[in-house]
Image (cartoon, rainbow, N blue to C red):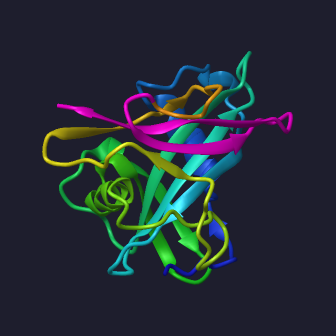
């Protein structure tokens, strides 16, 4: 199981995301008013122990109506070769581990492999900020991805009454800035 270090990260994840998120094609806010707050998420373990894996939900509280985004991230001790330049969210100095290269998880093969393992029921989602603590609020619906299924990370989260995906996938929750809880399909699985 991954160890969560309670230490400094400079710049912070939110500082890095504030510069990176508005440049993404799926961002629906106004870059001039971006005000990101951490709202939820979960972690997965890398079986090799080399890559930190986090699925963070951030809310842009600066938008006219707050918008929730899912940002999967891979934290690495060295640059990841063979990915597009926009995959790098940034680098940060970790108080224990040193320089970390933080990547958009959809471009990180370890992140995506562990997400597929979660969808197949082979691994368990972990609490975002506590070591060795499963997160039972993250649920998988339907069958996991096989050779004929495609995994889609839903970047802009749209709360549903049931908090379930009709096509199967992964459901998780977050808290809006006003304290209201929400759940949505964070990842969907569909035929290719």
Residue at coordinates 46% horizontally, 30% vertically from top-left? 23
Q: Residue furthest right?
A: 178
- Relative to 54, is 34 on the left or the right? right
Q: Between 119 and 67, which is closer to the camera in this rendering?
A: 119
Residue at coordinates 31% horizontally, 49% vertically from top-left? 144
> Residue 33: image x %, image y %?
70, 24
Residue 6 located within the stretch drawn in magenta? no
| Above or below: residue 131 compared with residue 29 | below
- Relative to 2, is 146 on the left or the right? left
> Residue 171: image x %, image y %?
53, 42
Residue 188 located within the stretch drawn in magenta? yes
| Above or below: residue 21 compared with residue 116 | above
Residue at coordinates 32% horizontally, 46% vertically from top-left? 143
> Residue 82: image x %, image y %?
18, 55
Main SS of the magenta part reads strand
Q: Between 97 and 56, which is closer to the camera in this rendering?
A: 56
Specify the quadrant of the image occupied by residue 77. bottom left
Q: Which residue lies furthest to the left in this view?
A: 147
> Residue 21: image x %, image y %?
52, 36
Numbered range of the magenta stretch = 166-192
Specify the quadrant of the image occupied by residue 9. bottom right
Quarter of the picture containing the C terminus is top left
| Above or below: residue 124 compared with residue 97 | above
């Amino acid at each position: 199981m991954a160890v969560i270090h309670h230490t400094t990260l400079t710049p912070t994840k939110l500082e890095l995301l504030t510069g990176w998120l508005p440049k993404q094609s799926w961002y629906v806010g106004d870059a001039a008013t971006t005000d990101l707050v951490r709202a939820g998420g979960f972690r997965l373990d890398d079986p090799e122990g080399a890559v930190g894996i986090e699925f963070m939900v951030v809310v842009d509280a600066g938008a006219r109506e707050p918008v929730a985004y899912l940002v999967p991230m891979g934290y690495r001790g060295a640059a990841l070769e063979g990915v597009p330049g926009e995959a790098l969210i940034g680098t940060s100095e970790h108080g224990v581990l040193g320089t970390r290269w933080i990547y958009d998880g959809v471009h990180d093969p370890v992140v995506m492999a562990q997400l597929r393992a979660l969808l197949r029921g082979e691994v368990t989602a972990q609490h975002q900020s506590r070591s060795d603590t499963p997160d039972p609020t993250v649920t998988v619906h339907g069958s996991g991805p096989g050779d004929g299924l495609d995994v889609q990370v839903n970047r802009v989260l749209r709360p549903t009454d049931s908090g379930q995906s009709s096509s199967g996938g992964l459901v998780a929750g977050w808290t809006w800035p006003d304290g209201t809880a929400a759940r949505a399909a964070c990842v969907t699985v569909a035929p290719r």
